[in-house]
Image: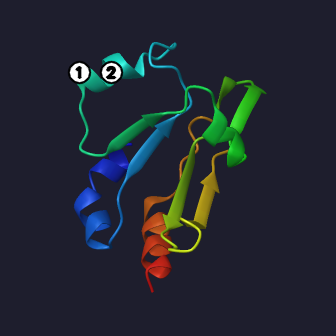
């Protein structure tokens, strides 16, 4: 989250908006509601409390050595499409909870999706 927030002006200049989604309940193990109250961010932050979005994108991580009923870390670039609402132009699904998308790769995909 921090790596993207720090480059938010560049992302917005490319015509994009950041949105973070966590597959967790507001008062779940990591207490995202409390965390965001103490550490506000400028971007949209959504909670996928029933894991519906996480499952729909194939990102649900039911059980692993570093995960139980959460999402694989993932980054998606979704472009607007007036006919269908949005088209996934890029997806990075982390193999473990520390595996994140390379930011420069995401920015490249973002710029390509706007061309």
Q: In the drawing, what numbered circle is on residue 38? A: 1
On screen, residue 108 versus residue 60, left or right, reads left
In x, y percent, where is residue 20?
43, 43
Secondary structure under the numbered disc 2 in the rendered image: helix
On screen, residue 39 versus residue 34, left or right, reads left
Find disc 2 in the rendering and name its residue.
Answer: 35
In x, y percent, where is residue 4?
36, 52
Q: Residue furthest right?
A: 63
**Residue placed at 34% from the left, 44% from the top?**
44
How packed mark 1 is, by other alpha carbons closer than 10 Å (few <14, some 14-19, many 20 or more), is few
State how the image is colored: rainbow
In x, y percent, where is residue 29?
51, 13
CB contact under 8 Å: marks 2 and 1: yes
Say if 76 sits above or below 49 in the image.
below
Say if 33 sits above or below 88 in the image.
above
Using the numbered discs, state the Cα–Cα distance from disc 2 to disc 1 in whole angstroms: 5 Å
Placement of the C terminus among the 4 image quadrants:
bottom left
Placement of the N terminus among the 4 image quadrants:
top left
In x, y percent, where is residue 21?
48, 39
**Residue placed at 51% from the left, 63% from the top?**
77
Foreground residue, 61 or 78? 78
Foreground residue, 94 or 43? 43
**Residue placed at 65% from the left, 36% from the top?**
52
Secondary structure under the numbered disc 1 in the rendered image: helix
How packed mark 2 is, by other alpha carbons closer than 10 Å (few <14, some 14-19, many 20 or more), is few
């Amino acid at each position: 989250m921090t790596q993207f927030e720090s480059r938010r002006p560049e992302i917005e200049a490319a015509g994009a908006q950041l949105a973070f989604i966590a597959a967790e309940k507001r008062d779940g193990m990591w207490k995202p509601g409390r965390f965001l109250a103490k550490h506000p961010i400028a971007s949209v932050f959504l909670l996928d409390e029933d894991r519906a979005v996480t499952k729909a994108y194939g990102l649900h991580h039911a059980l692993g050595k570093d995960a139980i009923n959460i999402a694989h870390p993932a980054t998606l670039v979704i472009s607007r499409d007036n006919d269908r609402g949005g088209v996934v132009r890029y997806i990075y699904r982390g193999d473990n909870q520390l595996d994140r998308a390379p930011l420069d790769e995401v920015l490249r995909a973002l710029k390509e999706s706007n061309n």
